[in-house]
Amino acid sequence: MNTPNDPPVSKNELVRREDAVLERIAAIVGRRNVPLGEVHVGDDAAVLAPFVGEMLVSTDVAVLGVHLDPALFPLEDLGFKAVASAVSDLAAMGGRPRAAVVAVCSPPGTDLEELHRGIADAASSTNCPIVGGDLTRSKDVSVAVTVLGETPGRGSVLRSGARAGDTILVTRPLGRSAAGLRRRRAGAPLSDPLVIAHRRPWPRIQEGIAARHAGAHAMMDLSDGLGIDLHRLADASGVGFVLTEIPVAEGASEQEAVSGGEDYELVITTSDPQRLLRVFAERSLETPIAIGLVVRDPGLRTWRGEIFTRDGWQHEL
């Protein structure tokens, strides 16, 4: 992978350079304890053991300059966020991750090893091994992650299952990621807890599994903000909602909690909130917070008695 300023080299030398880069990346993302009978990084395709229950598949793309400001954050964080946000989609279904494949597009001179260290950190933290991927040149740095997961036992929790009378809950107070970005722009260090919430988001895998086991009717992750994602859940379910509380994380503003996005907390609906709380407590998980009720009328969506407008991160296409 030579740069435009490198001296001309033969095709064989280019192949050797590419192989060397791939070997170093494989050493970074490869997991030593590969389950018996599986084949991960290193072959033409990965080989995985049969999935249990329903199989989940989701793809997410992170682009430098869109999903991460390179002037404020190291390249490692782009890799971490790409994997974490994809795994969060599995958590939103109540699934557990099994594997991921990662495709990286980048211009010459990109520190691919730094990028893949972030990818490896997220894969290790979420127990979602990287089993394959691809590299190619492009004008911009982007990371496409496809995750595979499973939901043993009861079926996956969809965003379309909310019912009138359900209690709506979120897994934690909101707005930490948006507040972290604001603080970083103001000069806060990378070690600031709110800044970490932005650069190293944590998928709520165990919380999603607990909600599924507790019989949750509907669920999704708050990647674009409660002000948009709750409407998406209500649209899919054909219902409305009445909000009674929006929990704001310490250090965040109410607007950041509503529309900041990238919290990756879960919003859950259930007809038996006490059972949900009990299952979370039994698993030593933080207590979810009730924020309102699902109503039958899809045209009724309020907060403090006023219309709860759609407000959050909108992707430009």
Image (cartoon, grey):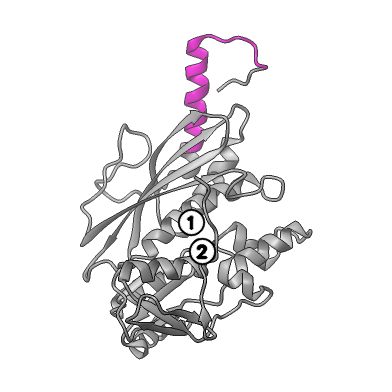
Residue, x 42% and y 47% (percent of image)?
Answer: 31
The residue pinned by badge 1 equals 84
Vertically, is 260 above or below 124? below
Q: Kindly tell me whether residue 105 is visible in this rendering.
A: yes
The residue pinned by badge 2 equals 202
Task: Determine which quarter of the picture holds residue 151.
Answer: bottom left
> Residue 131: x, y in percent?
37, 44
Task: Determine which quarter of the picture holds residue 189.
Answer: bottom right
Residue 8 on the magenta segment: yes
| Quarter in which the N terminus is drawn | top right
> Residue 168: x, y in percent?
41, 81
Q: Secondary structure at mark 1?
A: helix
| Along the viewing direction, whichever of 180 and 24 lies nearer the viewer | 180
| Along the viewing direction, whichever of 98 and 295 lies nearer the viewer | 295
Residue, x 52% and y 86% (percent of image)?
Answer: 305
Residue, x 57% and y 48% (percent of image)?
Answer: 78
Q: Amino acid at mark 1?
A: Ala
Residue 114 on the magenta segment: no
Identity of the residue furthest to the right in this view: 187
Q: Main secondary structure of the magenta part?
A: helix
Q: Amino acid at mark 2?
A: Trp
> Residue 24: x, y in percent?
51, 34
| Residues at circles 2 and 1 in contact by the CB criterion of under 8 Å | yes
Number of marks in the image? 2
Task: Determine which quarter of the picture holds residue 194.
Answer: bottom right
Range shown magenta: 5-25
Q: Earlier in the sequence, mark 2 or mark 1?
A: 1
